[in-house]
Amino acid sequence: RGWKIQSFFINNTVKIIIMKRFTTLFMAVTACLPLLAQTTPDDEVTFEVNQITYVVPDISKNEIAITDCKATDKVIIPETITYNEKEYTVKAIYEDAFYYSDATSIELPNSIDSIGKHVFSSSKSLTSIKLPEKLKYLGRDAFSACSELLSIELPETLTEIGRASCRERV
């Protein structure tokens, strides 16, 4: 026995039983998602440099993404980071990386082409930011509730802007 989901149904009774089992499974999996989101796969390398946490999503590439920032005041992210004698290019900023950050200004390298959702959200001290010239994607609510940020210059390379990216004051 076990969970079996079929793509066809013989009658409504079978459909209801399968849907109930699926709903129970779905609720159980959904309850565990926050725990799964906080774990790092064994082959993923995470490290910190100057109060900024980076992750190497694919060990076969020399690219990294920012996952967290505890730095304050002026934050300058370099285009490359050397860790364990290997040089990595900073390519992305993942969801919530600067959420509630105390940074007042942030300079991002032109190598970054993707900024996830809620990345700078609620960074109440943020007054200025320089977005990368090669940025293609800006996630939803990226700058929401940044009450001190009065303007953002968007690069011409931007092809997708998430919903409410600049909500509340910007």
Image (spheres, rainbow, N blue to C red):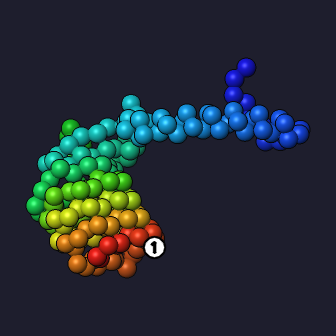
Image quadrant where one finds the C terminus? bottom left
Q: Is residue 89 left or right of residue 161?
A: left
Q: Nearer the viewer, residue 104 or 131?
A: 104
Residue 102 left/right relative to 59:
left
Left or right, 111 with respect to 161, comes to left
Q: Find residue 167 and report its horizontal and vertical position in percent.
A: 35, 72
Tell me which corner region of the image, top left, top right, bottom left or bottom right, holds residue 25.
Answer: top right
Q: Residue at x 57, y 37 (%)?
A: 27
Describe the element under mark 1 as helix, strand or loop.
Answer: loop
| Residue visible at 75% across and 35% down in the picture | 18
Which residue in the rendered view is the most extreme toward the left? 73
- Residue situated furthest right in the rendering: 10
Is residue 159 visible in the rendered image? The answer is yes
* Crowdedness near tag 1: few (<14), some (14–19) or many (≥20) residues, C-alpha within 10 Å: few
Relative to the observer, which residue lies in front, 18 or 2? Answer: 18
Instruction: Count numbered badges in the picture.
Output: 1
**Visible in this render: residue 91?**
no
Q: Quadrant of residue 45?
A: top left
**Residue at 44% across, 68% down:** 162
* 114 over 82 or under it: above or below: below
* Residue 147 at x, y percent in the picture: 23, 71
Rendered residue at 35%/64% (across/down): 142
- Which residue in the protein does label 1 denote? 159
* Residue 94 rendering spot, x and y as whole percentages: 35, 53
Q: Nearer the viewer, residue 42 or 18?
A: 18
Q: Look at the image and tell me in which quarter the N terminus lies.
A: top right
- In the rendered view, tell whether residue 71 sits above or below residue 169: above
Q: Amino acid at mark 1?
A: Thr
**150 is higher (above) or lower (below) than 69:** below
- Among the 4 quarters of the image, the one containing residue 129: bottom left
**Residue 3 x, y percent position in the rendering:** 69, 28
Residue at the limit of the structure toward the top, as seen here = 1
